[in-house]
Structure formats: structure tokens, C-alpha cells
């Protein structure tokens, strides 16, 4: 694989994930689901991890940071159901995590494709 490179044309994916991670950290308070402990701690932890990985991807410090955000996004999509707050009692928590999980994972894939041209060449239609 070619080395991990961040340029102004590609760093936006990492910085976008930093912003999405910051939203995850404050979203329990903003959307009013702070009393749902599983969702609160999940969002605080994952938001912090997404911020760290997004910064690393944007600056080119860690090649795996893009893929880490893909995994974090996939966990956010699954977490309402795994941790039990995906019921109709907490739609804001579940909806927030699913929507932002999709965005974080999608940006992680884009970042990986930008940074790893060899992987992009192996993908049909890209």
C-alpha cells in the first residue's frame, strides 16, 4: 500500500468527522436523552474516539484512523439495538446514532479511498 497522505483536498473528510464527533459529545444534552445512561456514555465515548481518529486522519498521523472511523460508525448504527435504547421510548438517541453512524462510516470510507489509491484501484467502478 502507498503511504498515508493528507492534503487539503482530502483532509476535509477527517475534519468533518471531528465535527461529527463533537456533535456526538453534546447531542445527549441538546436532544434531551442524557438520562438514557447507555446512550449518554456511548455517545461521549464514541464522540471522543471519532474526534481523535478524525484529527489523525486529517493530519495524516495514522493510516488506520480512516478505518477506525468506519468501525466507530458501524458501531453507532448497531449500538441502539445492542445496548437496548433502540426502542420507541428513545427515538432521538437511536435516530441520532444511526444517522451520524452512517455519516461517520461513509466519511471514513471516503477518507480511506482518498488516502489509499491502491485500494481504490481494486474497487470496481471507482
Image (spheres, rainbow, N blue to C red):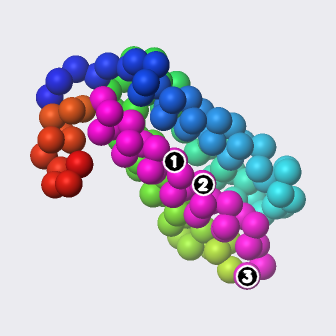
Residue at 63% over, 42% down: 20
Q: Position of residue 50 (x, y in %)?
A: 55, 38
* Magenta region: 88-115
Which secondary structure, mark 2?
helix
Q: Main secondary structure of the magenta part?
A: helix
In the picture, measured across the screen, residue 34 lies left or right of residue 121, that is: right
Which secondary structure, mark 1?
helix
Which numbered circle lies on residue 59? none
Residue at 38% over, 20% down: 6
Residue at 29% over, 22% down: 4
Q: Mark 2 points at which residue?
A: 100
Q: Which corner quadrant of the image does residue 21 belong to?
A: top right
Q: Mark 3 points at which residue?
A: 88
Q: Distance between the residues labelled 1 and 3?
A: 24 Å
Residue at 83% over, 57% down: 31
Which numbered circle lies on residue 104? 1
In the picture, measured across the screen, residue 68 lies left or right of residue 95, that is: left
Amino acid at each position: 500500500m502507498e503511504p498515508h497522505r493528507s492534503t487539503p483536498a482530502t483532509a476535509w473528510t477527517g475534519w468533518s468527522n471531528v465535527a461529527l464527533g463533537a456533535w456526538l459529545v453534546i447531542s445527549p444534552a441538546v436532544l434531551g436523552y442524557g438520562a438514557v445512561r447507555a446512550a449518554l456514555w456511548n455517545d461521549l465515548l464514541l464522540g471522543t474516539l471519532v474526534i481523535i481518529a478524525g484529527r489523525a486522519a486529517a493530519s495524516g498521523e495514522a493510516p488506520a484512523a480512516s478505518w477506525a472511523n468506519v468501525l466507530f460508525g458501524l458501531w453507532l448504527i448497531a449500538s441502539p439495538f445492542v445496548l437496548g435504547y433502540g426502542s420507541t421510548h428513545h427515538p432521538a438517541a437511536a435516530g441520532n446514532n444511526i444517522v451520524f453512524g452512517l455519516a461517520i462510516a461513509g466519511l471514513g470510507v471516503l477518507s480511506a479511498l482518498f488516502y489509499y489509491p491502491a485500494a481504490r484501484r481494486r474497487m470496481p467502478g471507482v
